Image (cartoon, rainbow, N blue to C red):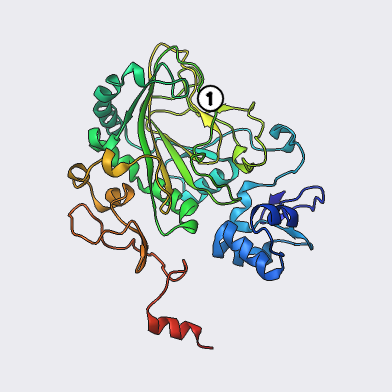
Amino acid sequence: MFQNGAWNRYLPTLTIFDDAFVDANICPGLSVDAEHRENLHELIVGAQGSRRQARNFFQPPGRVFLTAQAVHIGYFDARTPAPMADRGEAMSIESFDANESSVKIVDALRRDGGVIVRNLAPAAQIDAVADELGPQLGRFAEGKRTDFSGRKTLRCHGVLRYAPSASALIAHRMVLDVADAILLPFCADYQVGSMTGIEILPGESDQQLHRDDTPYPMCLAGLELQIGVMWALTDFTAENGATRVVPGSHRFLRAWHRPDLSHVVPAVMPKGSALLYLGSTWHGGGANRSQAARTGLINTYSLGWLRPENNNTLEVPPEVAKRYDETVRRLLGYASHGDGQDRLGAFHGSDPVWVAKARKGSDAVARGQVPPTADARQQSSP
């Protein structure tokens, strides 16, 4: 187990990534020599994490350990896993005040897979969002409801088309600081994956537990594809359908086996709070055994080079999106990913909704993008 910056003991029966797994799943046909091992680390956790590897780990021959940047995923046991409670996994969701540092919140999120920040938005702002979403939620047709999404659950997509006040939540500075820490090691920028208003009505049953990152056909240890943020527009209680989370479930590669999902914790939090969780964390809506509806706003942030879950440029078309500032428009996908010639989603025309400027602080060279010729010659010189 990794504690206080180091493994507290060596467990030879536990293999993180052995050569057989690497050969079969990551680089088939290649021998994993020192150079290949370094490349593998960079593939899994990025260059920054790979450079930290030698300082933090004892690496016996034939074993490839995860680096410090990815250590929050814990360990993987190739045998049938014991229940998480027997492994000493976290069985609760830590809750912080809104004035807590994002560093501590990120640490808890990486460790447990989910974290609550209490009273992150003022009541007036939350009430405004709820009032704007209310009419659209009420129009959610019964024919659109499914067993997975809930037969007694109302939904509103294209949130920013109907609820302009929600832009302050989607671009909340604390939330973006957390997204920066989790996602930016693996992309030049990130985007909104989806935005959905959700109202769980009395009588609704538990939603099926699931991960949000399953639309993407890849699973690399330490690489988070997205994070989710559930805003409480009403109080979330164990009785009215608070989102249920399986702490520690993000530490298991889905391609290997499913974790023990019996240890579920409701994200109980007051109105105006937010539950942040990793895309790899198992979770689901709760049963509403109360007499009142439970309303929330879920928005996800995904790596900028992935296709988002929802087509945000159609759900929030240009004539609507142009009302918002550059941060929100960038999150909606009205910007390219990357710099210079290495861009995805480039737009060569002119439109006031488009965000043409590169993200402040973007480091194209560090991300493997080609610098100007003179700089390239300078870098290659001894």
- Of residues 98 and 241, the one nearer the viewer is 241
Residue at left 48%, top 82%? 379
Q: Is 25 left or right of 277, judged from the image as shown? A: right
Residue at left 29%, top 37%? 166
Q: Is 144 left or right of 221, judged from the image as shown? A: left
User: Which residue sits furthest front?
Assistant: 29
User: Which residue sits furthest bottom?
Assistant: 382
Going by the numbered disc 1, the residue's amino acid type is Gln
Residue 33: x percent and y percent?
Answer: 72, 68
Residue 236: x percent and y percent?
Answer: 44, 25
- Of residues 329 and 116, the one nearer the viewer is 329
Q: How many marks?
A: 1
Q: Which residue is mark 1?
A: 208
Within 10 Å of disc 1 (Cα), the crowding (few <14, some 14-19, many 20+) is: some
- Image height check: is 70 above or below 360? above
Residue 302: x percent and y percent?
Answer: 43, 47
- Of residues 39 and 121, the one nearer the viewer is 39
Q: Quadrant of the C terminus?
A: bottom right
Secondary structure under the numbered disc 1 in the rendered image:
loop
Residue at left 25%, top 40%? 316
User: Which residue sits furthest right?
Assistant: 12
- Image height check: is 137 above or below 60? above
- Image height check: is 152 above or below 353? above
Residue 11: x percent and y percent?
Answer: 80, 50
